[in-house]
Image: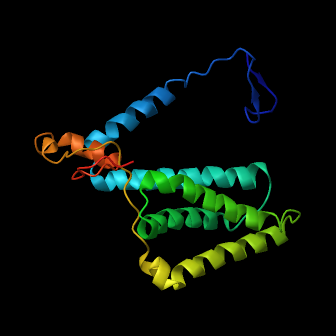
Amino acid sequence: MAFRYANNNEGVEVLAPGHKSKMIWIIPLVMVIGLIIPFIASKYVLTVVILGLIYVLLGLGLNIVVGLAGLLDLGFVGFYAIGAYGLALGYENLGLGFWSMLPIAAVMAAIAGAILGFPVLRMHGDYLAIVTLGFGEIIRLVLTNWASFTHGPNGVSAPLPTLLVWNLSAALAVVKPSMNFLIFLMIPLTSTCLCI
């Protein structure tokens, strides 16, 4: 039984403790759609979906910092840039693969967060916003202007994640729909080695 605490059918609706939602079918539906899309979508659509999901993760992280903690962090994307460039530059300069550089890049972004976090630990409000905005701008300017290391505005190409892949190009010449699924998983189609 639901109770209403407002006039004219407006306000907050308080549900009974044993209430079960009728929208429980949405999660399985989204999972089924997520498994079907790689088979029917083009590479462009998959790229847009993957980028959209990355931005959703960034938004969820920002919601924790700004929404739940109440801290106005305007340089949040700087840590994302440190992790992304760390992965790509580690692959390019150290010769490490995607799965090897992924935890290292996360640790690099966490270290940058700790280096910025300790000095500004007691700041709130406008002061925290100014410091984090400055941090984000410094990271952007360094990554854009240090062209000899980061390739400047052109950026760095990151490695594709590979799973235990053998030569799939001959096998996939017959089965065209599954190629989109492999592109969704970012598995290179011409790899002939076991790369982890």
Q: Position of residue 143 (x, y in %)?
A: 54, 77
Q: Is residue 48 above or below residue 74?
A: above
Rendered image quadrant of residue 160? bottom left
Return the residue found at the far right: 122
| Residue at screen point 83% across, 67% down | 120
Q: Is residue 158 left or right of residue 83?
A: left
Nearest the viewer among 112 and 64 is: 112
Rendered image quadrant of residue 58? bottom right
Nearest the viewer among 92 and 82 is: 92
Q: Is residue 6 left or right of residue 23?
A: right
Q: Position of residue 76 (x, y in %)?
A: 66, 63
Q: Is residue 73 above or below residue 153?
A: above
| Residue at screen point 73% across, 54% down | 65
Nearest the viewer among 15 and 7 is: 15
Q: Is residue 143 above or below residue 157?
A: below
> Which colour assignment does the render follow?
rainbow
Return the residue found at the far left: 174
Count of marks placed on residues: 0
Q: Is residue 169 above or below residue 118?
A: above
